[in-house]
Amino acid sequence: MVKLSLKEIRFIENYLIKNEVKYWDVRLELLDHIINSVEEKMTNKGLSFNAALQEVHQGFGNNLKTYVIYNHKLMKSGLYADKKGFEKFTKQKQKELGRKYRNQAIKTFKNNMLNYKFIVEYLAFSGLVLTVFQYFPKITVFSGLLILMLPTFYGFYHTFEEKALKKSLSFNMVGTFSILYWSIYNLGLQSLTFFYEKTEPKPYEFFVIMLVIMYQFLRSSMNLYLKILKENKALYKLKLS
């Protein structure tokens, strides 16, 4: 079995970067797949490295030539002429990760609701929110938005601190869950301000109840976030450090 040299492997990695495969975890998966495919074609078909790589490039749905005509000249050709196949691969990975994380989030939510410690935490949080709301309704409602944004702030912090999270598709996808919760809550607050602009007191009770309900999903998304963070750090350290 033909084995690629370190120089050839680095060429493939740079080739993916030049073809704008921006997420390092997607690039890593593609790199492993391309290396295995190129080695297989070089062994079984007797192809050169360049010929094997071109076949693999086309196998992803990329073309070796892009027929963009300017002054009767072909503008692009070769391995960097077309990257539509890689774009399609990335979109497919987004869909797969979306389904995967939705299922994991539901599983985490169910586990939390059967966990004694979480039930105590949830009841304590709910009691605190409802008690404070009796005395400071406006502050409680608007502080709810900050509470629901905590995973987002936490994510921003780790994105700056951890190389494993920079341009990671898996982390990008898991972050959408926390953004969804506070976006819905924020949209509700804006709608309340618009429709009840001249009404006092405003029906803030609805948003307090929403905050209490959403806290369950917030904690589930945080658990999932921490799980993906741990996995990403381990993979990054293993493959790219």
Image (spheres, rainbow, N blue to C red):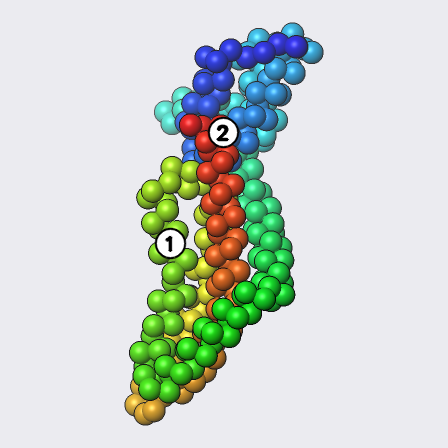
As helix, strand or loop, the secondary structure at mark 1 comes to helix
Q: Residue at x 50, y 58 (%)?
A: 221
* Image side of residue 70 versus residue 25, left or right: left
- Measured as percent of width and height from the top left, residue 44 is found at 69, 11
Q: How crowded is mark 1: few (under 14 residues within 10 Å), some or many (20 or more)?
A: few
Quarter holding the N terminus is: top right
Amino acid under disc 2: Leu
Q: Can you tell which quarter of the image residue 71 is in?
A: top left
Q: Where is residue 235 in the image (x, y as percent from the top left)?
A: 50, 34
Q: Find residue 112 and report its image quarter.
A: bottom right
Look at the image and tell me whether residue 173 can be seen. Answer: no
As drawn, the label of residue 88 is none
Residue at position x 63%, y 58% from top?
107
Left or right: residue 77 versus residue 53 is left
> In the image shown, does 125 or 164 lie closer to the viewer?
125
- Could you tell me residue 35's position as x and y percent? 57, 20
From this view, report whether residue 205 is shown above or below residue 56: below
**Which quarter of the rendered picture does the C terminus lie within?**
top left
Residue in view at x 55 percent, y 31 percent: 29
Query: Residue 4: x, y in percent?
Result: 55, 12
| Mark 2, residue position | 238
Give the residue at the far right of this rendering: 44
**Residue depicted at x 58% and y 43%:** 92
Viewer can see residue 163 = yes
Q: Name the residue under label 1.
A: 154
- Ranked by sequence position, the earlier of labels 1 and 2 is 1
Of 130 and 10, the residue lying toward us: 130
Q: Disc 1 to disc 2, how far (Cα)?
A: 24 Å
Name the secondary structure under disc 2: helix
Left/right placement of residue 58 relative to residue 24 reads right
